[in-house]
Image (tube, rainbow, N blue to C red):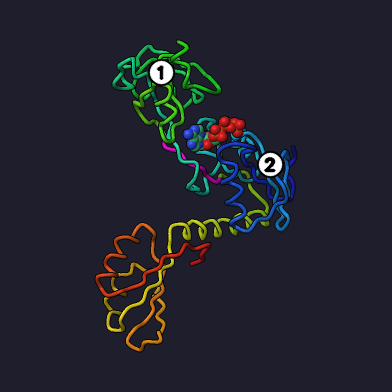
């Protein structure tokens, strides 16, 4: 497949990353018309098209320049050892690649697995881990349902992706060691790109940054006695100076500001102590600093 003047982005056709990826692209202003059962989907408002493929193929398509960008888990990019540039962590598709063994085997640590059979869809990363800890294991490559292999006596332990751990539990497995923490990333080809494509990528990166900042921030509004303003301004870990508005009661003011969500509860308690009332928190759609 030839690359063209259109910025081409590889995304997962159907799987855990698909909805979140499309949501991200729509949040940064790209419009598309129907993705179902299509390989190539053109954007309605930018010179951009999506290539919908299996996630396993994404890093190599980007490495080879068939696609300019890709959205894929770090686990896949590292397993395929594709030479691509990671532009940004996207904060979804969080998971870990872990070694697990049957609870019934009484294995307490991955270090006890010398000489054992390990089933995995990640042979490269698994081998690298065991090499690093100096163990000799036989790696059995399985493409799906790795978690049932110990019960079938195909393997003694597994190395698989875990998010909550419930699949491991259901299959009588105990997590022994995390060998990689992963999330979705935006990757870019290392091949040189024409100016118009690079400019479009820069524009999208600014928008993604705005989106990520918005997700981590909240707009808060409160009322307070006028004389509490200095104290409240001190408490607010504001990105900008707060907005202060008059109220019908001349002794009172309204204060509006943006704060990092992580600090909300702590800040709210301090604000209450300083005299703030009617504190309201709102999500933010997007923001550009
Ligand atoms: P494909 O048909 O595209 O090859 P797949 O079955 O390999 O799909 P999915 O199960 O949809 O892939 O997972 C896609 C990605 O989602 C993984 O590579 C990983 O980055 C991420 N992920 C997050 N949590 C999990 C989890 N609990 N199990 C598997 N993958 C997860
Ligand atoms: Zn896959």
Compared to residue 54, the image places residue 158 above or below, namely above
Whether residue 195 is in magenta: the answer is no
Q: Residue at x 33, y 73 (%)?
A: 277
Q: Residue at x 39, y 65 (%)?
A: 259
Q: Residue 157 carries which label?
A: 1
Judged from the image, the secondary structure of the residue bearing numbered disc 2 is strand
Q: In the rendering, at what x and y percent does residue 19 appear?
A: 59, 44
Instruction: Give the quarter of the image for residue 244.
Output: bottom left
Judged from the image, the secondary structure of the residue bearing numbered disc 1 is strand
Other residues around mark 2 within 10 Å, as few (<14) / some (14–19) / many (≥20)? many
- Span colored in magenta: 181-186
Indicate left or right for 62 with 176 as reference: right
Other residues around mark 1 within 10 Å, as few (<14) / some (14–19) / many (≥20)? many
Pick the front one: 253 or 217? 253
Which circle's residue, 2 or 1, is located before the other in the chain? 2
> Can residue 286 be seen by looking at this rendering?
yes
Pick the front one: 166 or 142? 166
Q: In the rendering, at what x and y percent does residue 217 appear?
A: 43, 61
Q: In the rendering, at what x and y percent does residue 62 appear?
A: 62, 40
Q: Distance between the residues labelled 2 and 1?
A: 36 Å
Q: In the rendering, at what x and y percent does residue 90 appear?
A: 50, 48
Tell me which secondary structure the magenta stretch mostly adopts: strand
Residue picked out by circle 2: 51
Pick the front one: 206 or 162? 162
Indicate left or right for 120 with 24 as reference: left
Look at discs 2 and 1 and give the one toward the viewer.
1
Q: Residue 218 carries which label?
A: none
């Amino acid at each position: 497949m030839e690359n063209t003047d259109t910025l081409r982005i590889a995304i997962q056709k159907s799987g855990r990353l698909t909805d979140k990826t499309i949501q991200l692209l729509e949040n940064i202003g790209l419009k598309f018309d129907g993705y179902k059962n299509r390989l190539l989907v053109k954007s309605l408002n930018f010179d951009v098209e999506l290539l919908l493929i299996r996630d396993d193929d994404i890093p190599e398509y980007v490495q080879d320049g068939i696609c300019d960008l890709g959205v894929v888990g770090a686990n896949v990019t590292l397993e395929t050892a594709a030479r691509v540039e990671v532009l940004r962590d996207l904060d979804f598709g969080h998971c870990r690649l872990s070694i697990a063994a049957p609870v019934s085997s009484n294995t307490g640590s991955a270090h006890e697995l010398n000489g054992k059979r390990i089933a995995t869809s990640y042979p490269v990363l698994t081998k690298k881990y065991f090499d690093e800890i100096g163990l000799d294991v036989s790696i059995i490559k399985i493409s799906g349902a790795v978690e049932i292999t110990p019960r079938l006596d195909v393997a003694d332990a597994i190395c698989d992706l875990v998010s909550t751990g419930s699949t491991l539990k259901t299959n009588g497995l105990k997590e022994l060691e995390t060998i990689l923490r992963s999330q979705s990333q935006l990757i870019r080809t290392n091949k040189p790109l024409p100016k118009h494509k690079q400019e479009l990528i820069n524009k999208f990166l600014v928008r993604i940054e705005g989106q990520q900042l918005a997700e981590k921030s909240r707009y808060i509004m409160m009322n307070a006695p006028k004389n509490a303003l200095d104290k409240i301004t001190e408490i607010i870990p504001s990105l900008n100076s707060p907005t202060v508005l008059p109220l019908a009661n001349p002794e009172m003011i309204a204060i509006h500001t943006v704060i990092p969500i992580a600090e909300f509860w702590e800040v709210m308690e301090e604000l209450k102590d300083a005299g703030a009332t009617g504190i309201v928190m709102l999500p933010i759609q997007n923001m550009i600093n």
